[in-house]
Amino acid sequence: MTDSGKASKTLDSILRQSLARFAALYNVVPSESLPAIWLETLKDLEPDVLTAALRRVEREFVPTHACPFPVPAHIRQYIAVAHNAIAEMDAEREWEKALTVAQDFGCDYSIASAKKIDDPALDAALRAAGGCRWVATCPDDQLPWAKKIFLDVYAKQKALPEMERLCSRKDYPGLGEAITALAVKKSL
């Protein structure tokens, strides 16, 4: 059996067990096709991620009249919250890195860029926040605004690959260029 076949069986087993627990917890008789639908919807997840999200749904899901039983979107919602929290922590860490670079090389952006900034998202966000010189020398009352702009642009730059997968190229072919242009425009 291939690795993908084993992973699929593992996910199927995890989902069947959890759906049986959900059925008992919420006193619902699920249809026979439910495990296959859930497996198809959640097959891209790693088993440990799926297990953690299912446990969280089991602990926190509150049935309502309109939604008496969890759906795959509940699983994805918990995973998205975790990803967003990690992304925010990464952005904060990158802000601290940018602030250090700006203070070390404030007037000589090319040296800073060549030596410390190897991430295009970090570079774009730093430029949008006003650049190394501005971040290094701006008044303390302006630094929170520079940080806010930095975090906003950094998050958009990091989300760009996912947004490009979700958007139709014919609907918006220049998404990456538009976000980069926005970063440049904010730095002016």
Image (cartoon, rainbow, N blue to C red):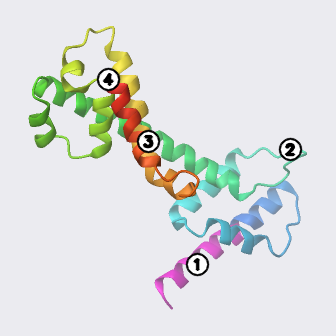
Residues drawn in magenta: 1-17
Q: Position of residue 23 (x, y in %)?
A: 82, 62
180 drawn magenta: no
Mark carried by residue 8 = 1
Residue 106: x and y in percent read: 14, 24
Of callouts 3 and 4, the N-terminal one: 3
Q: Which residue is mark 2?
A: 64
Tell me the SS state at disc 3: helix
How far apart, in angstroms, are the residues tagged by discs 1 and 3?
A: 39 Å
Q: Which residue is mark 3?
A: 178
Q: Residue farthest to the bottom?
A: 1
Q: Residues within 10 Å of mark 3 (few under 14, many from 20)?
A: few
Q: Which residue is mark 4?
A: 188
Circles 3, 4 touching at the beta carbon (< 8 Å): no
User: Distance of mark 1 from mark 2, alpha carbons?
Assistant: 31 Å
Q: How many angstroms separate mark 3 from mark 4 (CA)?
A: 16 Å
Query: Considering depth in this image, is 134 or 99 the residue closer to the camera?
Result: 134
Q: Residue at x 35, y 23 (%)?
A: 147
Q: Amino acid at mark 2?
A: Thr
Q: Does the CB distance between marks 4 and 1 fall below 8 Å?
A: no
Q: Is residue 116 above or below residue 12?
A: above
